[in-house]
Image (tube, rainbow, N blue to C red):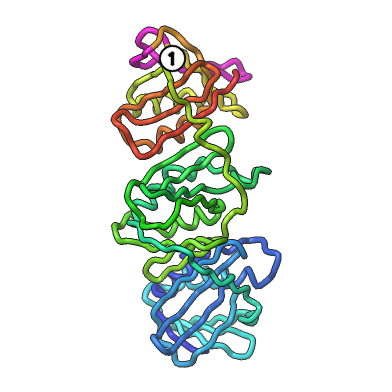
Amino acid sequence: MKFSITRESFLQPLSQVIGVVERRQTLPVLANFLIQAYGKGSRLVITGTDMEVELIAEAAADVSQDGEITAPARKLLDIVRMLPEGAKINVSLDGEKLTFSAGRSRYTLATLPANEFPATDQVESIETFEIQEDKLKKLLDKTSFSMANQDVRYYLNGLLFEFKDSGLRTVATDGHRLAMCDHDGKLGLGQNRQIIVPRKGVLELSRMLSDGTNPVKLGLGKNHIRLSKAGLVLTSKLIDGRFPDYQAVVPVGTEKKIQLDRGALILALQRASILSNEKYKGVRLEAGGKTLRIMAHNPQQEQAEEELEAKLTFDQMAVGFNVTYLLDALNALEAEEVVLEMRDANSSCLISSIGGSPDQHVVMPLKL
């Protein structure tokens, strides 16, 4: 294998793929990139995987000899990153060593055979469709923060994609809060379907998406989801489990509503959170008259109190929440005014924008 490539052309695919390479691996080869050079088409293909998520990136290179090998991912990325801008890199495989030089710099890396690199199961896409890149990114960004992390209920450690005739909905919950976001528009799928994409797959999907308006292709298999965009292909296994009935926790028929300015509420919560209990992050909301009072205290007997103007549909109520969950939900919304809806002080709270928005958020109350 022998090829030459500019630093910038090499750095881009390496940076894109490094996210799927775990620092701790069960197999030594999983710490490596699979590097494949093809003279036909002058293509360089970089692949990384952790056996759950695989990411493939392509770059243009001047290939004089075809070949494939695996090399240490982080060492390779760090060396290329530290080379001077505009440097031309010459790479060659000599036995079991990968040598690359740039100007007066020369490096030799240990390798492992390409046939030891795990191949992704052949993904037979049952259905494929296209969706605008920024729309998919918004669906992920508005909900992914509510995913659980290493929960024993493994099906919560991911994001639900719910495909319907009318469009696509993403839902995430960790049992304490829930976020859902809708994309309206026919996708041309033959049947309604639910899949759960694991946490890492969701984070890598979000990382490779931009705010561009070009369409990206999603392929759905029995056990995989695959996203393809220019020069990048991400394949993620799905979580084999049943997502809970999330509709059951979304409050309906709420009579108690608090309407107020989103920006002012965020700032008040951020200030009050400074003196909240570091472990529980609890704040108490007391609503009455035309005001909402936000109170926090901690074991050091320190206290915070904020007061905001609000429109209420009830006389009086007090309820506690985890302030981090409230802030995450409010920051995901975009409208100037928001409404907090509850049935009573012990029920979950629905947070949404005045005038409607594609995303809604549910936060469970906290006993203070």
- Quarter occupied by the C terminus: top right
Q: What is the chief secondary structure element of the magenta stretch?
A: strand
Could you tell me which residue is drawn at 47 percent across and 38 percent down?
A: 179
Residue to which mark 1 is pinned: 293
* Left or right, 83 with reference to 150: left
Most foreground residue, 330 or 80: 330
Dot 1 falls on a residue whose secondary structure is: strand
Identify whether 74 is placed above or below 151.
Answer: below
Residue 237 occupies which quadrant of the picture?
A: bottom right
Residue 126 locus on image (x, y percent): 48, 64
Could you tell me which residue is drawn at 57 percent across and 23 percent down?
A: 366
Identify whether 334 is placed above or below 115.
Answer: above
Identify whether 148 is placed above or below 57.
Answer: above
- The reply to whether residue 315 is visible in this rendering is yes
* Left or right, 286 with reference to 95: left
Residue 12 occupies which quadrant of the picture?
A: bottom left
Most foreground residue, 43 or 180: 180
Q: Residue furthest right?
A: 26
The magenta span reads: 288-313
Dot 1 alpha-carbon crowd within 10 angstroms: few under 14, some 14 to 19, many 20 or more: some
Give the tally of numbered discs: 1
Residue 233 locus on image (x, y percent): 45, 68
Residue 60 occupies which quadrant of the picture?
A: bottom left
Identify whether 188 is placed above or below 231.
Answer: above
Residue 169 locus on image (x, y percent): 42, 45
Q: Residue furthest front?
A: 190
User: Does 319 lie within the magenta span?
Assistant: no
